[in-house]
Image (tube, coloured by chain):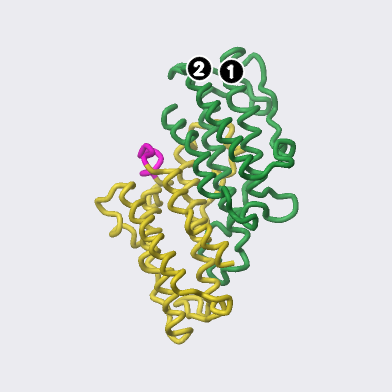
Chain colours: A yellow, B green
Amino acid sequence: MLQQTTALLARTPAVLDALVRGMPEEWTHRGEGAGTWTVFDIVGHLIHGERTDWIPRAKMILQFGDARAFEPFARFAQQRESEGKSLSELLDVFSSLRRGNLTELRALNLQPSDLERRGRHPAFGVVTMGQLVSTWAVHDLTHLHQISRVMAHQYRDFVGPWSAYLGVLKCEGHSG
Amino acid sequence: MLQQTTALLARTPAVLDALVRGMPEEWTHRGEGAGTWTVFDIVGHLIHGERTDWIPRAKMILQFGDARAFEPFARFAQQRESEGKSLSELLDVFSSLRRGNLTELRALNLQPSDLERRGRHPAFGVVTMGQLVSTWAVHDLTHLHQISRVMAHQYRDFVGPWSAYLGVLKCEGHSG
């Protein structure tokens, strides 16, 4: 299962490149209204996860088990990461961090039994290594789902009656 | 606006390649339960749209205006298109059809005033060329949104308590 997971994790930078690198800012720098995220914000959020969430938590599980809780993940910290950068620069940073993190993951050489190891989440309590790594992949998918919705939102007023058939325009977001 | 739209339409084949070409079938050949679509089915549906929906309808608007209704789009016709093919073959077909259709669209040489031209949708009645072309792009995004959800569904049981934070797992589909 780890192989199936890393197959997805390894692809996300290329997916984002294909979808948004070099796109007009009408697609990438507009959100869904005040206080919502743009594509640019979402890439910054993914960068922050690469820096502070997945691999550091995997290492904490290996080192401390469930005796010590993870650092809470700052889900809105991307403004600092992104300030003054272009979307292309953020995509470069994300791609490079992801590549490095997958190298680190391979170096941990996790065996099936390691996926049962327990760690401690600051809000949920006991979680496992397998859940952490699976969440890393589904977190990518959550934000790809969000990006397609945020982009579709920019065309909400242009599709006329077809909005009735376009599921993405009915998605309310579910926090991401 | 046509340029912003075609920027997206031109990228979708590469986005799908990056996301799913060569992926383990656990990601691409499983749906969300009985009667739901897999990634493989969705690519077949996109192919069917390239063949029968967007460009044929644009040409009908130019030829007949709102005097004649479009052929209804068979939203479940992909089984015929896909039978006996691999996902890679479908992706090749989609990419080639999309490239050809964008060439046809450019050849129509639509001017801003053409986007106001009226056609007749079999269910909605009067629609415009601009709405049709915008819908083509948002239709891509609807299915990218769906693909990320269908893929995430495969990991629903693996993420443990994190499902509370993963918006894509809360999406109910909204018909696509």
Range of magenta residues:
A22-30
The kind of residue tagged 2 is: Leu
Chain letter of mark 2 equals: B
User: To which residue does mark 2 refer?
Assistant: B108
**Protein chain holding label 1:** B
Q: Residue A73, relative to residue B4: is it above or below?
A: below
Which label belongs to residue B59? 1
Q: Position of residue B31 (x, y in %)?
A: 68, 53
**Percent of width and height locating residue A115:** 55, 76
Residue at the spot x=50%, y=34% of the render?
B9
| Disc nearer the start of the sequence (2/1) | 1
- State whether residue B70 is above or below residue B19: above
Residue B99 on the magenta segment: no
Residue at the (40%, 48%) spot, across then down: A39
Which of the 4 quarters of the picture holds residue B55? top right
Which is nearer the eye, B58 or A65?
A: A65
Q: Residues within 10 Å of mark 2 (few under 14, many from 20)?
A: some
Disc 2 on helix, strand or loop? helix
Question: Residue B8 placed where, x, y %?
Answer: 46, 36
Residue at image coords 63%, 28% = B53
Q: Secondary structure at mark 1?
A: helix
Give the quadrant of the N terminus of chain A. bottom right
Residue A26 lies within the magenta run = yes
How far apart, in angstroms, are the residues tagged by discs 2 and 1? 8 Å
In x, y percent, where is residue A168? 55, 44
